[in-house]
Image: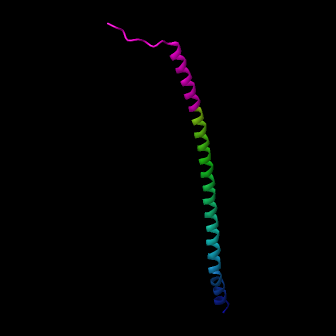
């Protein structure tokens, strides 16, 4: 007669154990989502920083090119059209 009682004992704990397993799985999945979100945030910040520095370099190059063009316009006289 002890066998049926022992059989019921683990069946009584089955909902509690399954809920605990489900809760642990949800916590682990949530932690994975949070880690992925933090990684994506870090990557976006790095890309924005890289884009800002690239824009600064392009502005510097553009300014230097404009100065060089201005100097060339002063040094090289404008050519007049040849009259026949």
Residue 58 rendering spot, x and y as whole percentages: 56, 32
Quadrant of residue 2 in the image?
bottom right
| Relative height, residue 26 to residue 59 (above, below) | below
Residue found 59% across the figure and 29% down from its top: 60
Name the residue at 59% across, 44% down: 48
- How many numbered marks are there? 0
Magenta stretch encompasses residue 70: yes
Residue situated in front as seen by the camera: 56 or 39:
56
Q: Quadrant of the N terminus?
A: bottom right
Question: Which of these two is toward me, 70 or 28?
Answer: 70
**Residue appearing at x 63%, y 54% in the figure:** 38
**Magenta span covers which residues?**
58-84
Quadrant in the picture for the C terminus: top left
The way the protein has been coloured in the rendering is: rainbow
Image coordinates of residue 65 in percent, x first then y, are: 54, 24
- The residue lying toward the viewer, choosing from 46 and 9, is 46
Residue 71 belongs to magenta span: yes
Furthest-top residue in this view: 84
């Amino acid at each position: 007669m002890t066998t049926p009682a022992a059989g019921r004992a683990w069946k009584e704990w089955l909902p509690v154990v399954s809920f605990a397993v489900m809760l642990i799985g949800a916590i682990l999945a949530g932690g994975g989502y949070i880690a992925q979100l933090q990684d994506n945030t870090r990557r976006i910040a790095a890309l924005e920083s890289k884009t800002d520095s690239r824009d600064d370099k392009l502005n510097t190059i553009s300014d230097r090119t404009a100065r060089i063009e201005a100097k060339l316009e002063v040094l090289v006289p404008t050519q007049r059209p040849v009259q026949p």
